[in-house]
Amino acid sequence: MVLVSKAEKRAIYFYLLKEGVIVVRKDAYLPEHQGVEKVSNLKVMMIVKSLKSQGFVSEVFNWQWAYYAVTDKGVAFLAKALGKYKFYF
């Protein structure tokens, strides 16, 4: 079981909503994900795996890399989930 903080989950959701896609290397020992700063690759793998099981992202797996694209249902979910948080830019 992997414990993911609210800030890390928010960062992953924000990245997905902003980019629409995310690429995850199948390597649980990477200290940090290449796209989402300050979040370990394992945590990104687990969050995206959960989103995939709920039908919010679609997956294509090739040569130890997983490519996830957000579905229409996923866009609505991410916007609603991020609506609870306040962003300061």
Image: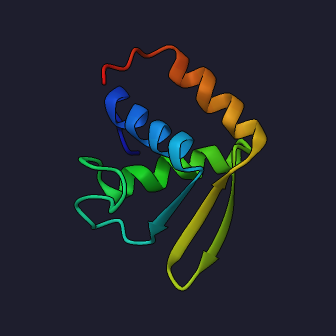
Residue at image position (42%, 51%) is: 44
Q: How is the image coloured?
A: rainbow
Observer-nearest of 33 and 5: 33
Residue at image position (71%, 41%) is: 54
Q: Work out which residue is located at the far front of the displayed protein and give it.
A: 89
Residue at image position (67%, 63%) is: 59
User: Quadrant location of the C terminus?
Assistant: top left
Image position of 75 with respect to 79: above or below: below
Describe residue 80's horizontal placement relative to residue 10 as left or right.
Answer: right
User: Quadrant location of the N terminus?
Assistant: top left
Q: Position of residue 22 (x, y in %)?
A: 52, 58
| Quarter of the figure with residue 26 | bottom left
Q: Position of residue 17 (x, y in %)?
A: 55, 40
Q: Position of residue 86 (x, y in %)?
A: 40, 14
Q: Position of residue 7 (x, y in %)?
A: 32, 29
Observer-nearest of 71 and 48: 71
